Image (tube, grey):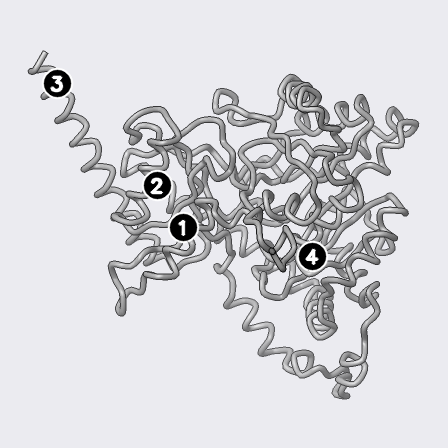
Amino acid sequence: MNMLSRKASHDSHGQDSSYFLGWQEYEKNSYHPIQNPTGIIQMGLAENQLSFDLLKSWLRRNSDIVGMKKDGVSVFRELALFQDYHGLPALKNELVDFMAKIRGNGVKFASEKLVLTAGATPANEILMFCLADPGEAFILPTPYYPGFDRDLKWRTGVEIVPMHCSSSNGFRITSSALEQAYQQAQKLNLKIKGVLVTNPSNPLGITMTKTELNHLVDFAIDKNIHIISDEIYSGTVFDSPKFVSITEVVNERITSVSNNNIWNRIHIVYSLSKDLGIPGFRVGMIYSNNETVVTAATKMSSFGLVSSQTQYLVANLLKDKKFTCKYMEETQKRLKRRKEKLVSGLRNAGIRCLESNAGLFCWVDLRHLLGSATFEAEKELWMKILCKVGLNISPGSSCHCCEPGWFRVCFANMSQDTLEVAMRRMKAFADSTISTSVLRGSIAKWEN
């Protein structure tokens, strides 16, 4: 007799995805320029490590805050005893200001509509618990972040219906693709409760256009469903076009959509993990105009709170407007330079990327290196790049891409020297693969 629950004893977590398997291989044989120069370079981790020097410098200048002091007086007792799941008002006030600043102050946010969570992962899961019952579904445009298979489904029992986007239009969202996904859900007898998008996109590294956002709003009004916009990369936009939030689009249409109650069905997920490069601090949030959602989500957040010490530190960091302004500007410059370094290194190897303007990664086209236009060939290519070339990149199939041969490659979690090593390896591999392919073609021609 099984003494454990079905959830504990069945492998439905999604950890067997190639996205996570690549990490496991990396951990067994991780690259180090001196200790392990032939090891695997981690290019599957979307971390922003380019501006730690700025954060460290701020911490040095503000040692009192790090030491839990206010105006030279210890606040340790108050922080150690603070356990209100509504969170520190000072942090919530600073967060809504920071969110507005990233969006060019085009939209104002109210702190009472914000729920603190221990990162974006529980924020997305809490919204699933609030908006859908087990067996109901959300539409997600593909390719999407592989962790969503775990975050949205594992504990909630909610299903994901993929909305397939194509390279023919740069993987953009269309009205017809949304409708197709909805019809597919009906065939599967799944009730659609909403659409979840990441904007800017992970893994594409692109911001959504106003046209796409308007398609989404029209679709949500027509079907009477929710929109979740995961905007955790909103501060990483380093090139035009600028970031446009779903809130801005609805704001512009307020007179025409006010009677449809659409505001109550739009929910934002945000976190400081990517924009400030502090994923270990676990500072995430939900923003919603729906009072019932905010109340329920606040109660659920008690299962994953942000520590009061972290809240205090981050509230003070965000309060320093001069610093955050300089930090965001400098980080975006550094991200742009680093992305250009990756793109030129890949171009030198004869490899193209989807044109991008945001995020910590590029969506890389390796279709010309496939043995055949199949997902089996993509897996084979991924294994070669991981085990023989020593680069952990994420295959498109792990992101549910409907076209084999696309890969997500991260660039902000390593030093420039390490990136250069990775590019040399990639060029050597691409050159040898193409040479082998040409040779095989010549032999086949002679045999015929």
Query: Are circles 2 and 1 on residues that touch, CB within 8 Å?
Result: yes
Cα–Cα span, label 2 and label 4: 32 Å
- Label 2: how many residues lie within 10 Å, few (<14), some (14-19) or many (20+)? many
Where does the C terminus fall, quadrant-wise? top left
Q: Specify whether 38 is left or right of 374.
A: left
- Type of residue at label 2? Trp
- Label 4: how many residues lie within 10 Å, few (<14), some (14-19) or many (20+)? many
Cα–Cα span, label 1 and label 3: 35 Å
Q: Specify whether 171 is left or right of 406.
A: right
Where residue 268 sits: x, y (%)?
74, 44
- Type of residue at label 3? Ala
Instruction: Give the answer, above or below, for where 68 lies relative to 348.
Output: below
Q: Residue at x 23, y 41 (%)?
A: 429
Q: Which residue is mark 1?
A: 22
Q: Which mark is residue 284?
A: 4
Where residue 88 sits: x, y (%)?
81, 68
Location of residue 447 (image quadrant): top left
Where does the N terminus fall, quadrant-wise? bottom right
Q: Which mark is residue 382?
A: 2
Going from N to C along the chain, the mark reached first, 2 or 1, is: 1
**Helix or strand or loop: what does disc 2 sit on?**
helix
Q: Which residue is mark 3?
A: 444
- Label 1: how many residues lie within 10 Å, few (<14), some (14-19) or many (20+)? many
Cα–Cα span, label 3 and label 2: 26 Å
Going from N to C along the chain, the mark reached first, 3 or 2, is: 2
**Helix or strand or loop: what does disc 4 sit on?**
strand
Where residue 414 sits: x, y (%)?
41, 58
Q: Residue at x 57, y 68 (%)?
A: 55
- Type of residue at label 1? Gly
